[in-house]
Amino acid sequence: MSQAQSDRQSFSTLPLPRWQAITATVVIAAVLGVMYAGWVDEIGRRYTETGVKRGLVTYAVARGLNAVISVAQGTEVALQPAGIGVNFTPGQILDPVNDLVERFSWIMLASTTSLGIQRVLLEIAAWTGLTVLITVLATLTVILLWCRRTASYRWGAWVWRITAVAMVLRFAVPVAAILNEGAYHLFLEQRYESSRQALEASIERIQAVNDKTAQSKPPQPSGSWVDEAKRWYQSVAAGLDLSARIEEYKQAAADIAEYIIDVIVIFVLQTILFPLLFLWLTLHWLKTII
């Protein structure tokens, strides 16, 4: 028997054909190299930190909106039409949108918490003990792949499955974080930035109206007819100014509702729908491996 025939007979008893064993060995070595290099973990961690900061900034915007709307709802304007004292609270027109803002703040808190959980999972995935376990499994897999005994096929198949599942789980969270942030920059970033800036502008707008309302003083009663005419004029002017403030509140409420919905959609996509999609793909892949 020639040497070439001997080699072919030798490799014919491998659990896998020779080219498949070479391919599997190269893939395992590449995965181990990426795992020890740590750049995937670093990118995933950085993107997750960016998402957490973005969520905290948006949560602060939501609380700021809630604060200025609460001030507007508690500020009264005193008028004396026809000599009769009447108190108005124009900020009450913001009551429906304030309910939306409160729910918005809860959604932002939940979204930021979700990103915080993802950050913890990244730390777990990069745990040294898990890295050592995957290295041992990968080494054993390579040994069984190149083992010349056909009896090792059964054990090799199970070890290969366990190793593949461990590797998929090891990189599932950082890869999901990278893909999630990539989808954000590709589809959602511009909409988020414009909506956040508009909400911040709405805070300043409502605050300016609140300041005008707080500085308004009711006209003081007096006995002279000149002062009485002046008081009547001030009352009419205050009534017209009150109508203008109500219109400003209405416009601010309409803008706030629109932009809040946009931000909610963005964070629901980023912290709920996209992670669920990545989880489904991971489970589908694991099912295929097993």
Image (tube, helix red, strand yellow):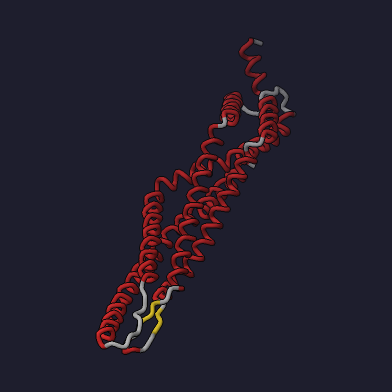
Look at the image and tell me in which quarter the C terminus lies. top right
- Can the viewer see residue 51 in this picture? yes
Residue at the image position 36 percent from the left and 63 percent from the top = 205
Residue lying furthest top in this view? 2
| Horizontal arrangement in the rendering, residue 129 relative to residue 252 (left or right) | right
| Residue placed furthest toward the right | 151
Q: Is residue 13 visible?
A: no
Residue 189 placed where, x, y %? 40, 49
Image location (x, y in percent) of residue 242: 33, 76
Is 79 drawn above or below residue 178 in the view shown?
below
- With respect to residue 277, does 132 lie above or below? above
Image coordinates of residue 175 in percent, x first then y, are: 53, 40
Q: Nearer the viewer, residue 268 or 106?
A: 106
In front: 133, or 42?
A: 42
**Residue under the point 50% across and 66% down:** 102
Provide residue 282's location: percent of width, then percent of height: 57, 45
Which residue occupies 41% across, 45% down?
Answer: 185
Quarter of the picture holding the N terminus: top right
Q: Is residue 8 left or right of residue 51?
A: right
Q: Nearer the viewer, residue 65 or 16?
A: 65
Image point 65% across, 41% down: which residue? Answer: 124
In the image, taking residue 146 as reference, residue 64 lies left or right, namely: left
Q: Residue furthest front?
A: 224
